[in-house]
Amino acid sequence: MNNKGLMAGIIIGIAGLLFMFKKGSSAIAEAPVDSVLVRLKNVPSDATMWSLRLTDSNVTKLLDSDSGYERMDIDNDIIISVPQGTEFPLRVEHLQIAKWNEDNTALIVINEFQSLHPTLYDFDLGDYGTVPDVTYRNAFIEDYGSYYFDFSKGQFTK
């Protein structure tokens, strides 16, 4: 092999490694003690940011990201501390992916979902009615640990 071929192979290899690390490797980090870590998978290509808020199974405690930011870069994991005694499975109060418009003046929601209730609230009844809520997904976090949320499947997996 000549020097040009060797050099081209090295450059292609380095570029491949950089691309892999930029997009995140398939291995997910271990969640801190008493926490849940979530990483996104199969996200629409135009998404640039995301947010996540969880709640306990009884919908009595809202659990927000430990970062203090409302929205995170799409490539970042979100870590949420879960106090001892919180009832699992955790429900999703909201998981939203978004991007800015071309002028960076308005947020465009690309996709969002929740796992609180499968039907819409009916204000005339003063309770949940029978009309399905299209944002509902039967997706829950079963225990402490690290999870992927796969947009193509609409589910959390370890």
Image (cartoon, rainbow, N blue to C red):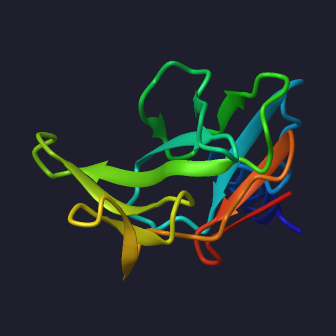
Q: Where on the picture, by quarter, is residue 84?
A: top right
Whole-percent x, y for residue 65 in the image? 58, 28
Q: Nearer the viewer, residue 139 or 50?
A: 139
Whole-percent x, y for residue 128 in the image? 40, 66
Residue at 86%, 57% (x, y): give it. 158
Q: Nearer the viewer, residue 68 or 133?
A: 133
Which quadrant holds the N terminus? bottom right
Q: Where on the picture, by quarter, is residue 45?
A: bottom left
Residue at 68%, 30% (x, y): give it. 80
Left or right side of 4 for 114: left
Up-down relation of residue 100 to residue 127 (above or below): above
Residue 132 visible here: no
Whole-percent x, y for residue 142 in the image? 83, 53
Q: Nearer the viewer, residue 42 or 52?
A: 52
Residue at 80%, 45% (x, y): give it. 88
Q: Where on the picture, by quarter, is residue 9?
A: bottom right
Residue at 63%, 55% (x, y): give it. 40
Q: Nearer the viewer, residue 114 or 95?
A: 114
Whole-percent x, y for residue 107 in the image? 22, 47
